[in-house]
Image: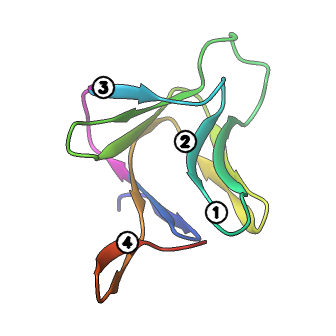
Amino acid sequence: MIFQARQGDVLVQQVRKRARRGRAVGERGRLILAYGERTGHAHEVIAAAQDGDGGVAAQMFEESDGARYLFVARACVLTHDEHGPIALAPGAYSVTIQREYEPDGMRPVLD
């Protein structure tokens, strides 16, 4: 079974082997998967322990079609102020932000 977890409007699903392509996504050293539009709280990936070799614990890339992939090099945790933490083992994950229908078309879910 492939690992998948949802934290509010963010879905992470482990994928088989995936090439790192597209543009790297990150903000001033933080790896934010999504912000809550109403609260401003962040779905953030952080290293589970700081005793690693000091290298990057995780990176995210956005491809030209908007698809996002998270690459975890060492154990990390997906955190959010209003949700429980989710442990992420090393590997590759697709990152999907839930969308909803409204008469004018699809839009991201407001968290």
Which of 29 and 39 lies nearest the eye of the viewer?
39
In space, the residues marked 2 and 1 are separated at their CA atoms by 24 Å
Q: In the rendered structure, find residue 36 and report the number of the disc placed on it.
A: 1
> x and y percent of residue 108 in the render?
43, 69
In the rendered structure, the answer to whether residue 65 lies left or right of residue 85 reads left
Q: Are marks 1 and 3 in contact (CB under 8 Å)?
A: no
Name which residue type carries label 4. Arg
Magenta residues span 14-21
Q: Picture quarter containing residue 18?
A: top left
Q: Earlier in the sequence, mark 4 or mark 1?
A: 1
Q: Are marks 2 and 4 in contact (CB under 8 Å)?
A: no
Q: Earlier in the sequence, mark 3 or mark 2?
A: 3
Q: Nearer the viewer, mark 4 or mark 3?
A: 4
Residue located beneath label 2 in the image: 89
In space, the residues marked 4 and 1 are separated at their CA atoms by 14 Å
> x and y percent of residue 90 in the render?
50, 35
Q: Is residue 16 magenta?
A: yes
Name which residue type carries label 3. Arg
Q: Picture quarter containing residue 22?
A: top left
In the rendered structure, the answer to whether residue 88 lies left or right of residue 1 reads right
Residue located beneath label 3 in the image: 20
> x and y percent of residue 100 in the render?
38, 80
